[in-house]
Amino acid sequence: MKTSFALHCLSVAIIESLAGILGDGIILAACSLSCIGSKTWPPYDMIMISLSSSRFILQSWNILEYLMSIFYENFFCQENVNVASKTIFTFLNYSSLWFGAWLSVFYCIKVASFAQSFFIWLKLRIARLVPWMLLTSWFCSVTTAVPFAWDLYSVHKNITAPSSVTNSSAWTTTRIDSSGLLFFLYNVGVAMPLILSVVSSILLVWSLWIHTRQMQNNASGFRDPSLEAHTKAIKSVCSLLIFYVTYYIAFSFLLYNLFLYFSTPKSICIAVMAACPTGHSIVLIWSNPKFRELPARIWHHISCSVRTTSI
């Protein structure tokens, strides 16, 4: 039964997802425009196109799920619909987590300054490695998400089978095996991008902090644009890491089904999960002038068109 608080959280999640769709649409349009006509796509734009497109689809799918759960709850809870919804949801979440992790890795390799030979090797070859990194992410997301449909379906059949047909010990063993497989797949799908994101963010912040302290010691008292840029980069990376970890925690609670449907904790997790990608997109737009210029150009074009029409 849907409570007023659950409906409120779902409404907030829909608004947050709509804002995220707008932000991801801006990022996707800006990166796509810069890649049109060029024979080779910059690695940063390739990562941002993959990340923004996966989140665009994810948030659109989430809005559809929220609306279905509010207005068509009986249809949404059907076996086939529920299994397909959870499988698609898991795949899109894994994809966005992987692409977000590769963005952190790319920032670390391009911006951080370490003297290790392996780091220098990565810095020189990152442009050629990015396409393979993205393809690997798609493959890992599919590999870890599709089996969820099989295991969820088998668990559902064991739960709904008549007691005269189902052997209790066999049902318990099958359920434990299915839960163990899902637990393993979840950790494989989430642990690696989480580790990559956390480690690369820590290394980048560490490098930027050392560089910032050196510039502060050498500062002559005047305003240093380079110092401000490094400070802004540290704030951006820290905020992205906070969004990533918060999203991971809320996603874990939902995936493990720890709370009842439409319960207060689950409703809060849904609202938090919708807010984190949106906040991430806002930070990306705020930290990149190319993303900020596109809405200004669109607004200027619309204003000029309105003025011309009115005249």
Image (cartoon, grey):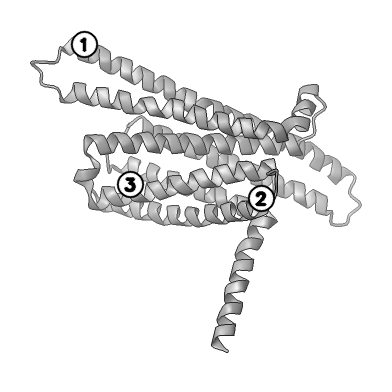
Q: Quadrant of the N terminus?
A: top left
Disc 1 from disc 2: Cα separation: 56 Å
User: x and y percent of residue 52 in the render?
Assistant: 54, 47
Q: Disc 2 designates what residue?
A: 35
Q: Disc 1 designates what residue?
A: 170
Q: Disc 3 designates what residue?
A: 65
> In what element is the residue under mark 1?
helix
**Residue type, mark 1 in image:** Ala
User: x and y percent of residue 254 in the render?
Assistant: 37, 35
User: x and y percent of residue 199 in the render?
Assistant: 64, 29
Work out whether mark 2 precedes mark 3 in sequence or the reverse, and give the earlier one: 2
Can residue 201 be seen here? The reply is no
- Residue occupying the point 76% across, 23% down: 118
**Residue type, mark 2 in image:** Cys
Residue 304: name its quadrant.
bottom right
Q: Is residue 48 left or right of residue 266?
A: right
